[in-house]
Amino acid sequence: MNPTMVLCWSCRGVVPTGEGFCPGCGIIQPPDPRRDHFASFALRPDFTLDLAALDRGYREQQQRFHPDLFATRGATERRYSMEHVTRLNEGYRILKDPLLRGEYLLKLAGFRSQTPENSAPSDPAFLMEVMELRESLEEVDLKRGDALGQLTRLRNQVEEACSGELLAMTQYFAAWFDSRGQGSLEQAARHIDRLRYFIRFIEELDRKEESFFS
Amino acid sequence: MAYNDKVLEHYEKPRNVGSLDKNDTHVGTGMVGAPACGDVMKLQIRVNDDGVIDDAKFKTFGCGSAIASSSLVTEWIKGKTIDQALAIKNKDIAEELALPPVKIHCSVLAEDAIRSAVEDYRKKQKGGSHAP
């Protein structure tokens, strides 16, 4: 059997892989787990993404598979509808978020991030920078009048750093799709790691700011 | 999440939190991080003329297990020679704190921090006035 074809579970007719419905009998098919999330929304895999097109694709697909449309159908059809919608939600969540999208692209490219045990030592100067940011955040005294101002300054500084990492990710992923050089992928992964430190910092900052208002 | 008592003990009363003068030629500074979770750990050692670690300080921003691992390590390495300190393995730390499998990477981080601090110290010694 051609791997790009499957048999319809209902009428046993031939269905091209990835089709949501059987072309013969029109019955809903189970989602194809090998299909990547970009393809689910008819998008080209890339780090740079047209968010409006993602939203549009998401809405269109939701309208095709929404469980309400299958409420009066059999258990199998209802289950497949749920599976489609769950997968679409997961894909939307991943593609919408730049960090998750970057990690997902690495996964699609077959890039294995190193485990902590065998990873090369991280850049100590960068870690020092993160450490100093964390210390500055720790030292913000919420009882002082300018605490909120200090938190805002730290937030602006780190958000700017995040933008820098996103820009670098954009460039290295573009280079990867251009020439498939492993080096570009490694660089993209490095900037994803850096972004994760900064996002973690912003989470801590949010927590501190919240405790100020509560 | 249920933390082991020893983890809690170190987390609530961490030993040797702070900093040593990183420009001191007797001080080695180790900086390590866990990119998967964004934790950062700084471990500093001061080595006396007999090659014994006579002081150690740490600063860790991370989860309870990461803090406990680094706190424990500072206690263990004080009074040890550099080679004895390097012999400490993440397995020893994880066992002492009874870390669950998902927290093993915290003990790996602490082991890496010792190595990183020793490396920094040795680099300073080579580049310093004691060079032949």
Image (cartoon, grey):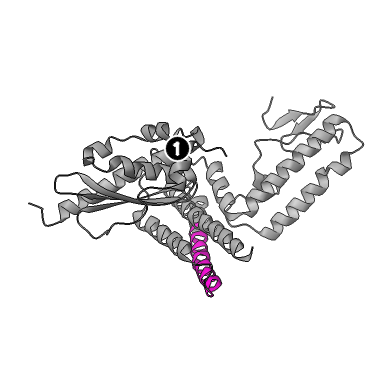
Dividing the picture into quadrants, the one containing residue A64 is top right
Left/right placement of residue A176 relative to residue B86 reads right
| Percent x, y of residue B95 | 41, 31
| Percent x, y of residue B60 | 42, 51
Left/right placement of residue B82 relative to residue A45 reads left
Dividing the picture into quadrants, the one containing residue A30 is top right
Chain to which the residue tagged by mark 1 belongs: B
User: Residue reaching furthest right?
Assistant: A72
Magenta-highlighted residues: A145-169
Q: Magenta span: helix, strand or loop, mainly?
A: helix
The residue lying at 49 percent from left, 36 percent from top is B4
Check disc 1 and give the amino acid type: Lys
Report the front residue among B14 and B46.
B14
Q: How many marks?
A: 1
The N terminus of chain A lies in which quarter of the figure? Answer: top right
| Percent x, y of residue A175 | 48, 54
* Residue of label 1: B6
Residue B46 in view in this figure = yes
The C terminus of chain A lies in which quarter of the figure? Answer: bottom right
Q: Is residue A153 magenta?
A: yes
Label 1: state its secondary structure: helix
The residue lying at 39 percent from left, 55 percent from top is A127
Report the front residue among A126 and B91.
B91
Report the front residue among A110 and B68.
B68
The residue lying at 70 percent from left, 57 percent from top is A53
